[in-house]
Image (cartoon, coloured by chain):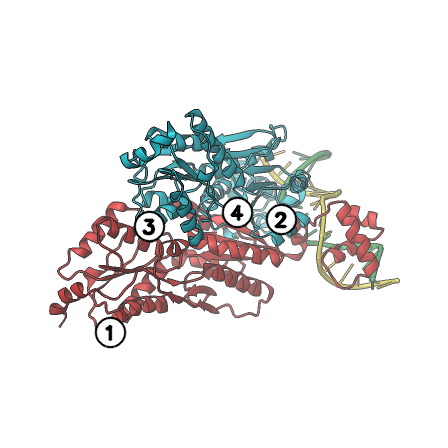
Chain colours: A red, B cyan, C yellow, D green
Amino acid sequence: MTDVAERAGVSPSTVSRTLRGLPTVSPEVRARVEQAARELNFAVSRQAASLVTGRTGVVAVLVPTLNSWFMGSALSSLGPMLRAAGRELNVYVIPDLAERTAFFERLPARRNADALLVFGFDLTDEETARLDDLGMPVIYVSQHAEGRPSVYVDDVAGALMATRHLLNLGHRRIAFAPTVGASGFSFSSRERLLGYQQALTEAGIPLDDELVVTMAIDDKRGLVSGVGRLLGLREPPTALFAEQDELAVAVVHTLRRARIEVPERMSVIGFDDHQVAEWFDLSTVAQSPSDMGRVAGELALRLIDDSEADHTRHVVLPVQLIPRATTAPVAAPSRQLADPAAS
Amino acid sequence: MTDVAERAGVSPSTVSRTLRGLPTVSPEVRARVEQAARELNFAVSRQAASLVTGRTGVVAVLVPTLNSWFMGSALSSLGPMLRAAGRELNVYVIPDLAERTAFFERLPARRNADALLVFGFDLTDEETARLDDLGMPVIYVSQHAEGRPSVYVDDVAGALMATRHLLNLGHRRIAFAPTVGASGFSFSSRERLLGYQQALTEAGIPLDDELVVTMAIDDKRGLVSGVGRLLGLREPPTALFAEQDELAVAVVHTLRRARIEVPERMSVIGFDDHQVAEWFDLSTVAQSPSDMGRVAGELALRLIDDSEADHTRHVVLPVQLIPRATTAPVAAPSRQLADPAAS
DNA sequence: TTGAAAGCGCTAACAG
DNA sequence: CTGTTAGCGCTTTCAA
């Protein structure tokens, strides 16, 4: 910075003021400084600046993985949003328990970021407490955290929409497929089950535990046996609501391999509006992870800049039903099979 | 740090030495310092440290998006790898031209990282030149950069494998489907086309431009018309090699909708061994983005720590053929159709 | 093996 | 509007 100052014939302070865009610099001086900086390829050292301002200029995120549609979309919008605000994005990927323990033990983000966004982890009370005294705003994304800022979608409403859509098509035996192994979304999973149950109850349909079958997306045998279990019921379902699109697609695939036509013999609806949903004409409930990333980033910036801001504010994002080709009115034959028992 | 020093009854220098694990600290003192640090929840400020060491402790990556299988997998392994080495991961997401221009103009990574990994961008010479005088090692990932450190997979070999696999199954009319719009993989795209052509030439089969049809993964109409064009040829192909698994899956889907059985009437093979490949029993050529991330990270650390290291070293990662259920021997009827012209 | 002192590059008062 | 001065929290000589 001294170099730039010399070259422009001003003091370092003036260079600093110019480069930070402060208004208290005359246009001519500003021009000279900016040119000098450009010629010298000068960029302010965030390190040195943050030493005196106490601000690092970085926002950190804690994610279980980056290898998922949700995280990818969320961070792909969060990144540019932060960049536009002149902040850097620091990512902590915590794929397993060992890394997780290490992270919470050392809290490497301490003093190295201005805020932390925690994506879709199911934290223990102890972990949450650790984060509470991290000395920076912590925003919980894709989960509800009591008394702390959080951003998530309206999972219950989405599940209600999906289930009502199936009910409106005449389905009465509707299965729900939660998924395991999808790191860090048990909050959504629970909420979606709740919405499913609520819709059935509204319609006066008793809940049946046999219709709730957990499956893992990448466990082909589990899928086959799960689908088999449903079809083998005395009153098999005519429709299925999968917790996630990826699972829904896998189920559709499994059904079609077993020569069960979708949607003719079984309607299937997912949740997410994942990219694959469009390719496969899957009916689904859309959520927008990129909105989530952006909104979470905005919230973070607000909490950084304004310590008076409400630190218990929750943002709940909307969802939207997207009917496509995997849901259809219940077929007559199935209807007749189900009818005698239903009445 | 002064606080820790006081509490432990030593000087700040000693605290610094202890916390950096230098051997010149007596065990008793070390124990006292470590306890004091723990009690005070103390973490060294990277900012202040880097001011004097000249090292930031962060590795930056430049990516076109995070919303892709490749980037997600690569960064999911790079992140923990860097963390284990005590480094932070800084991500610059550059989804469009405006952000790209801004990035290369301001080069915000300058002085704020110790190395930069550039993932799958097709850079102009000018951009590359800008990076050359960024003042830190720049590693090109998923592309070959002449005279600069780079890490990529053996796309040509992979395409050779895929095409030979089809040839071995008796196919003679083999289409290739490159994809557009997949940000930043034109290097791989070109290489895979090369491998495809090479395999055909080896087998004495003349190249036919009509068999190369570009399609976009998310353009359903384009897929339908592309597939239609191939099937409408005087000698339609009996097999198709798609540049990427995602495209391959979309093509399989399009074919099956048109009542063209896969693999009975058309074999399809992809490239990547993307997660969807397994779900859909897609034959493919496996590459490992997570290996790529790890290897690139290791290379970065080596270049940071050892300025003597070879800065023109290329790492080429292997690929592997994974035959599954979408490729089969050429069917007799198609063979007969093709034969008269082939001989 | 430890401590004292200097200084990394910047920003924030304050004075002019 | 601009310059001077002090000091942010750490590491690194150098001396003890």
Give the residue pinned by disc 3. B258
Q: Nearer the viewer, residue B19 or A245?
A: A245
Give the residue pinned by disc 2. B47
Give the residue pinned by disc 4. B183
Can the viewer see residue B17?
yes
Left or right of residue B242, residue B326 in this image: left
Q: Residues within 10 Å of mark 4 (few under 14, many from 20)?
A: some
Residue A26 drawn at (x, y percent): 82, 61
At label 3, the amino acid type is Ala
Q: Residues within 10 Å of mark 3 (few under 14, many from 20)?
A: few
Asked if the residue at tag 3 contacts the one at tag 1, i.e. Cβ–Cβ closer than 8 Å, the answer is no
Give the residue pinned by disc 1. A203
Residue B127 drawn at (x, y percent): 65, 42
Residue B260 drawn at (x, y percent): 31, 46
In terms of secondary structure, where does tag 1 sit?
loop
In terms of secondary structure, where does tag 2 sit?
helix
Tell me the number on the disc at residue B16.
Answer: none
The CA distance from mark 1 to mark 3 is 39 Å
